[in-house]
Image (cartoon, rainbow, N blue to C red):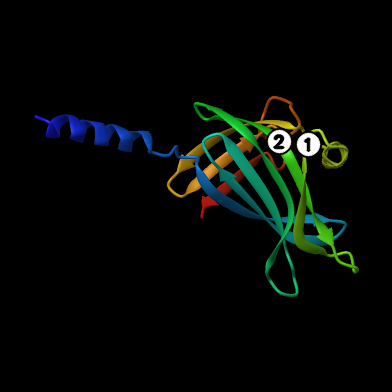
Amino acid sequence: MIAVPVIMLSSCSKDDEVSADYMGTWSAVVTVSESGNSIQCKDKFTFTQSGFSDLLQLRDPSTGKYIDYMKLNGSMTVSGNALNMKVTEIGVSTFDVTGYPTGSIVMYKEGSSVFTSLFSQTGQSQNVKSVYEVSGSKMTLKTDNNNDGDYTDDGETTVYTKE
């Protein structure tokens, strides 16, 4: 008789540990062209139950390795397939004497003057609403970056692969 309640309790705690399908680290590689120059970028999202981190890495053409360039950290709420994210920290790599990123990111918290300045330079909103869909090891993330009510503009839909 005692074994039945113990099994039921242990199975309940295992159910509580099931991760949502969006949780984990996801990455996408895109090529960005500007002024005739192209650079390969890796966008790495890590989602937890209540937060996120978004790391942008740039590919060094001479080594083929990715260098950490910019990072956002924040809190998040989830409702169905909607992710409501609020950026609470922003960071950018330091640069060497030749102007290349070192990969060492200095983070600035919400409320600091540097946070406000960096955010205004990026042109992004501190509050981001996205919808997602997971299929196997792929996650499609749609974000209305310009707040026009759709996801049809360049860069608003990205397919990530689970790492």
In three-dimensional space, the C-alpha distance between marks 2 and 1, rounded to whole angstroms, equals 10 Å
Residue ranking furthest to the bottom: 62
Seen in the picture, residue 114 relative to 43 is either above or below; the reply is above
Residue at 49% x, 26% y: name it.
80
- Quadrant for the N terminus, please: top left
Placement of 19 over or under 36, stated as above or below: above
Asked which secondary structure carries label 2, the reply is strand
Type of amino acid under label 2:
Val
46 vs 69, left or right, is: left
Residue at the (25%, 31%) spot, across then down: 9
Residue drawn at x 25%, y 36% is 10
Q: Of 45 and 97, which appears nearest the observer?
A: 97
Q: Is residue 20 visible?
A: yes
Q: What's the residue at 18%, 29% (across, down)?
A: 5
Dot 2 and dot 1 residues touching (CB under 8 Å): yes
What amino acid type should be assigned to the residue bearing mark 1?
Gln
Where residue 31 appears, as percent x and y from the top left, is: 71, 57
Can you give x and y, in whole percent of width and height, for residue 6 in the image? Answer: 19, 34
Q: Secondary structure at mark 1?
A: loop
Q: Residue furthest right?
A: 97
Residue highlighted by disc 2: 87
Judging depth in this view, the residue of 11 and 137 nearest the camera is 11
Q: Quadrant of residue 35?
A: bottom right
Could you tell which of marks 2 and 1 lies nearer the N-terminus? 2
Question: Relative to residue 113, is residue 140 drawn left or right?
Answer: left
User: Which residue is label 1 attached to?
Assistant: 124
Q: Residues within 10 Å of mark 2 (few under 14, many from 20)?
A: many
Can residue 153 be seen here? The reply is no
Report whether 88 appears left or right of 10: right
